[in-house]
Image (tube, grey):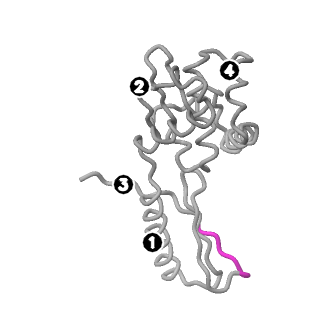
Amino acid sequence: MARTRKPVVEVRRSQRRRRTVSAYRDGERVVVLIPDRFSRAEETEWVERMLARLAAREERIQRTDDELLIRARRLTNRYLSDHAAQVQPASVRWVTNQNGRWGSCTPDDGTIRISHRIQEMPDWVIDYVLLHELSHLVVPSHSARFWELVNRFPKAERARGYLEGISAATGLVLADD
């Protein structure tokens, strides 16, 4: 049985917070917000409870390779339908070994790999990265023609800004491709 590693937890106490407790992921750590008046025992209880809730939510929204392929087909039909014959990826999958880019495409064999780092990002950001890689099946380079295809996505500029912000905030230096 595989053991999952317990995340680093940061507890933030607030004098203004009266009864509510909330938690969210911030990169690799979990931030738990609790009322300042909670005892250490209550803090421990609520941290465990919030970690369980986060894990359950993440399990519900777990994105799979199959879901990614369906998303790729939808994006192709919507934004690259005039190139549908060329945009037939052999595989589209999440990978954990991409630390220097959000996604990659090998046009010669039609494989697309998307970094697991974006799995929890908004759908429109995932769509942008996926469309970027799908566009490489039509135009392998980052030429003007390539960017014309990518920019068919209405939130392309917004998604690029989002990814640049994530890179800056986390200190990651990630390439466009």
Task: Kindly identify the residue that appears in the image at 49 percent across and 19 percent down.
Answer: 106
Secondary element at image label 3? loop
**Residue 146, disc:** 4
Give the distance between the C-alpha atoms of the residues marked 1 and 3, in whole angstroms: 14 Å
Q: Identify the residue position indicated by label 3 in the image.
A: 4
| 170 sits left or right of 43 in the view | right
* Span shown in magenta: 11-16
Which is more N-terminal, label 4 or label 3?
A: 3
Which is more N-terminal, label 2 or label 3?
A: 3
Q: Residues within 10 Å of mark 3 (few under 14, many from 20)?
A: few
Amino acid of disc 1: Glu
Amino acid of disc 3: Thr
**Residue 48, disc:** 1
Which is more N-terminal, label 2 or label 1?
A: 1
| 114 sits left or right of 147 in the view | left
67 or 82, which lies in front? Answer: 82
Give the distance between the C-alpha atoms of the residues marked 3 and 2, in whole angstroms: 32 Å
**Residue 90, disc:** 2
Task: Kindly identify the residue that appears in the image at 40 percent across and 42 percent down.
Answer: 66
Dominant secondary structure (helix, strand or loop) of the stretch shown in magenta: strand
Can you give x and y, in whole percent of width and height, for residue 161 in the image? 75, 40
Q: Residues within 10 Å of mark 2 (few under 14, many from 20)?
A: few
Give the distance between the C-alpha atoms of the residues marked 3 and 4, in whole angstroms: 41 Å
